[in-house]
Each structure stands twice: as structure tokens, then as C-alpha cells.
Amino acid sequence: MNTGKTVFSQIMSFLPLDEFRKCVQRYRGNFKVRQFSCFDQFLCMAFAQLTYRESLRDIEACLRSMSNKLYHMGIRSNNISRSTLADANENRDWRIYADFAQVLIRRARQLYINDDFGIDLDNTVYALDSSTIDLCLTLFPWARFRKNKAAIKLHTLIDLRGNIPVFIEITDGKVHDVNILDILIPEAGSFYIMDRGYIDFARLFLIHLYRAFFVVRAKKNFKYCRLYSQTVDKSTGLRCDQTIVVTGVESSKDYPEKLRPIKYYDVETDKLFVFITNNFTLPPLVIAQLYKYRWQVELFFKWIKQHLRIKTFFGTSENAVKTQVWIAVSIYVLIAIIKKQSKIEKSLYTILQILSITVFEKLDILQVLTNIDCNPQTDNNNNQLLLFNL
């Protein structure tokens, strides 16, 4: 049992500290630092994410009220001040925490590699999308989006097995979604599910050349020439399964190979969807189902916006914002690792809610998360010798 450790300390024990030190050394994060190390900074920011702190003053007040427990939480600095944390977020390279998040992501993907996401498919399936976070232009001038508005975009690629984010790019709001395909390196044999905002035939052809597959929703002005059609079962919602070539002046040059459009009618929404793919082997209904699971990335954005602190920022610089986002992603992935390694059936939301009110308790984390009676007196009563025979 871990009766001598706080729940927060037990959560952090799942972190690979050797890998964290490598990330710090890579960017000289602790150079000329005497007291408040990068790991102290990470722990304070992790505490803020786990307990829903709203500001630096909020973090300072809560940690100072529990100053006698900071050492047991792993925080070596006993006097946490908001100015110290603000300076750390401002000046310490955000890439330290981005690299460390990637370490956690690799571990999480190995744990979830055999999970079923709803379709019996051996290939890795990714969903790509972006989410915009509005900011105040006066406070965040580096993130100018429109004339009187600032914003950042989280461009995210998630692995549908476990809904683990494997790629995140943080840009200002002006960067168009399709530009992210320029820095994304496709994996051969994998599927990339995207909305119609990512249609660019030159970039899609590059995915094809990498021997990867894409499923993307077609735009209304999509021009093509049908070569032949396959028969489909219209009772399933399918309307057609065709083989085509693109006929647009520029698009025909950008994508000279054949494509496969699939039309699907959704009874619930009364909409006709047209999906384009370069895969000619999967059944057409599976292609339509793959696009349906693209909504998992939307649910990921909704989850982290509601349950982690990435809409209210503790600093206004680009470095501070990226630091906070990457630590938030690290906490999301860390909770997913704890859930899988500990074989906990509860949802990530429920786990986070429980941990948020028990971080200072000295209880076994498994007992806390599995609803087992964790009163040590109950465990010892049966073995306690009686002083008097009454």
C-alpha cells in the first residue's frame, strides 16, 4: 500500500523521470536555476490541471495553504510564488514539455495498440482536425487572428485506438488547416480521416505516394469524370461506389491517379455525404464508417477544453501558452496511462474528477479509483491483540 504517499505523488510516480531529465538537458532548462527546477514547474502546472486552478494567484494560494505537504508531493521548493511560476512559464523552453509529452504519448500508444475502436481493421487509423481557442488581442498580440481578435489553433492528429493525440501543432488562428499536411509525415498503410477543409489534391497525392490512405469529405464543387461504378446495397445507406479521375484544370495535374468517391445517405440527419478515398480494397460501408469515427477528434477537443485548463492561460507570451498546452496534454495522456496500466474501468472524466479532490490524501490510488474501502484501521482490526479479556 501507498499510505505514506499522497495521491498526487502516486500519480506523478507513473512519469518516466529519466526521460524528463533528458528533455530538460536537451534545452538546458535548469541552467542557472537554484531552487525552482523544471520538474517543480511541471508539478505545479500539473497540480493546476488536476485541481482546476483558474490563475497563478489561485495556484499560489492553494499550494501555500498546504506547504507542509509540498515535499510529499515531490515539490522541493517550499515557498511557491506566482511570480516565480510566471517567470518559469515565460522563460523556460516550451519544447521541454512538448518532447516529454511525446514520450508519454509513445508509452500510451503501446498500451492501447490492441484496443478496438469500433471497426475490425488492422491498420492504424488517425483523425485529423483543428480547434480554435479565442484570445484577447491586447494581451496576446503575437496571436493576431482578425482585426480585433486573437486566437490560437490546436492542429491535432489522434490515434483512434485509445484516442491518444500523436501529433499537435500550435499555431496562430490565421494558419489554414490544410497547411498542416506539409509538416505531417504519413505512415505507410495507415488511414487519415479528414474533413473537407483538408482537400488539396497536391497534398493528398503526397499521402498517396507515401503509400498511406486517406478518407476525406468532398466539397460541393468537386469535378470529376466517372470511369465505372460498383453495385451497392442501398438499404445500408450507400448510394454509389465509383472509380473516377479528377477533371479540374489544376487538380487533374495535382492528382493524376484514380480516386474512389463513395456516396452515403444518413437517415438521421437527412444528408447525403460524399467521401473520397484512395483505398480500393475496403468495402464502401467501412469507408463511410471510418469517416463517422472522425468525430472522436471533436470529442477530444471538447474533453480537454471542458476538463483541463487550456482556455484560461496563466501567461500571455507564446512560450507560456505552449508550455501550458503541452503540460495539459501530458496530464491527459498520463491519466490514460494510469487507467490502462491499473486496469480501471472508469472513464477518464470520472478518474480526473476523483483525483481532483483527493490529491492531498495519503490513500492508495487504486483504492481511491476502484471504490475499495481504504480505511487502514479496518484492515488492522482483525490482527490487533486484545489487552484485556472481557
Image (spheres, rainbow, N blue to C red):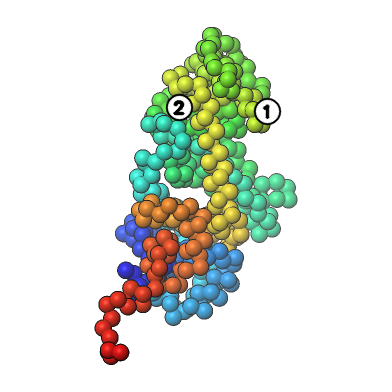
Give x and y (percent) for residue 105. Answer: 40, 48
Give x and y (percent) for residue 382. Answer: 30, 76
Circle 1 is placed at which residue position? 270
The residue drawn where x is 48% and y is 52% is 347
Q: Is residue 52 above or below residue 158?
A: below
- Tell me the amino acid under the disc marked 1: Asp
The residue sitting at the front extreme is: 390
Q: Nearer the viewer, residue 116 or 224?
A: 116
Question: Which disc, if any, is residue 213?
Answer: 2
State the CA–CA distance, disc 2 to disc 1. 28 Å
The residue drawn where x is 40% and y is 68% is 373
The residue drawn where x is 41% and y is 34% is 124
Give x and y (percent) for residue 33. Answer: 41, 70
Give x and y (percent) for residue 284. Answer: 50, 21
Q: Nearer the viewer, residue 55 or 90?
A: 55
Number of marks in the rendered image:
2
Helix or strand or loop: what does disc 2 sit on?
strand
Q: Is residue 334 above or below residue 289?
A: below
Quadrant of image for the N terminus: bottom left
Which quadrant of the figure has residue 117?
top left
Q: Nearer the viewer, residue 14 or 23?
A: 14
Q: Report whether residue 115 is seen.
A: yes
Which quadrant of the figure has residue 342?
bottom left
The residue drawn where x is 64% and y is 28% is 267
Instruction: Check disc 1: other Cα within 10 Å, few if <14, some if 14-19, many if 20+.
Output: few
